[in-house]
Amino acid sequence: MESQGILQRDNFGLVLCELKKKELFSLVEEARLLPIVQKAVVLQYKRGERLLFNSNNDQKVFLLTQGIVNLDVYSCNGEAVGSFFLGKNEFLPFSMILKSTLKNFNMCACTDITIVAMAKTTFEKLIYNDTTIEQFLDCQKSNIIANFLKCNMINSYVQPQMRVSLMLHHMSEKFGTVDESFEYMIPKWLTQSILARLAGTTRETVGKTYRMLRNEGSLVGTERLTRSFSQKYKEYL
């Protein structure tokens, strides 16, 4: 399913509320946000929708404020390069991540998501000569690239069950929650089909890996990773 999102214009309070969800904008005084808020719009997508952005020939910055997005990355000749996932504090202007353009990405909502769209010039005025914001953005960019390289490293393992286990650990550590026993809860949107695609294997292999992990006492049901699982696989990452 493809969508350009449910567009909500001229809602000052909604835009301001959404921007304040992002760590980046906690570094900015509210008075400095007003020019952005007045010109920005909110886009909302449902889980499973492919993201399409119509900027009407104006360069835009798209900032995720709620949910998780999957990005499949392609080279200029259309060959698939890899996939990675972004949460709300990582969704930065694409030129700051991989020095590419929107046409080189296929983006899909893993959960219901909300995006604030604003003019690129407005965003650049906000960060211009602000060393605190620039350092924050540089750090986030480095984290995103490191995450992308880590996913590629995981997929360099020959044994598919190892790839599944390592990707499960990585994605749960990145997006999962920790329960009272300090064990990771696997995100509900991280289905076995998605995990198979990320690990470059089949749904059947993921099912076999889950059974192996349960027999080892590393996985409880399909939702919780035990501490022994984290201790075993974190040394590979």
Image (cartoon, grey):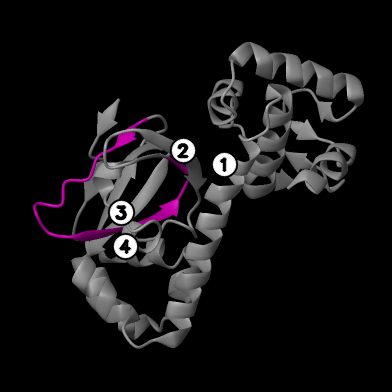
Residue drawn at (22%, 47%), measured in percent from left and top?
A: 7
The residue at which mark 1 appears reads as: 152
| For residue 174, above or below residue 187 | below
Which segment did they paint magenta?
Answer: 49-71
Report, in whole angstroms, how far the alpha carbon at label 1 lies from the one at label 3.
18 Å
Instruction: Name the kind of residue labelled 1 in the image.
Output: Asn
**Secondary structure of residue under mark 4:** helix
Instruction: Name the kind of residue labelled 3 in the image.
Output: Ser
Name which of mark 1 and mark 3 comes first in the sequence: 3
Label ID, residue 100: 3
| Residue closer to the observer: 185 or 157 | 157
Residue 224 shows in the view: yes
Quarter of the image that includes the N terminus: top left
| Residue closer to the observer: 116 or 16 | 116
Residue drawn at (47%, 71%), measured in percent from left and top?
A: 138
Instruction: Name the kind of residue labelled 2 in the image.
Output: Gly
Eye-nearest disc, 4 or 3? 3
Quarter of the image for residue 107 reads top left
Give neighbour class at mark 3: few <14, some 14-19, many 20+ (Cα, 10 Å): some
> Does the magenta-highlighted stretch encompass residue 54?
yes
**Secondary structure of residue under mark 3:** loop
Q: Are marks 4 and 1 in contact (CB under 8 Å)?
A: no
The residue at which mark 2 appears reads as: 82
Quarter of the image for residue 126 reads bottom left
Q: Is residue 134 left or right of residue 175?
A: left
Q: Are marks 4 and 3 in contact (CB under 8 Å)?
A: no
Name which of mark 2 and mark 3 comes first in the sequence: 2
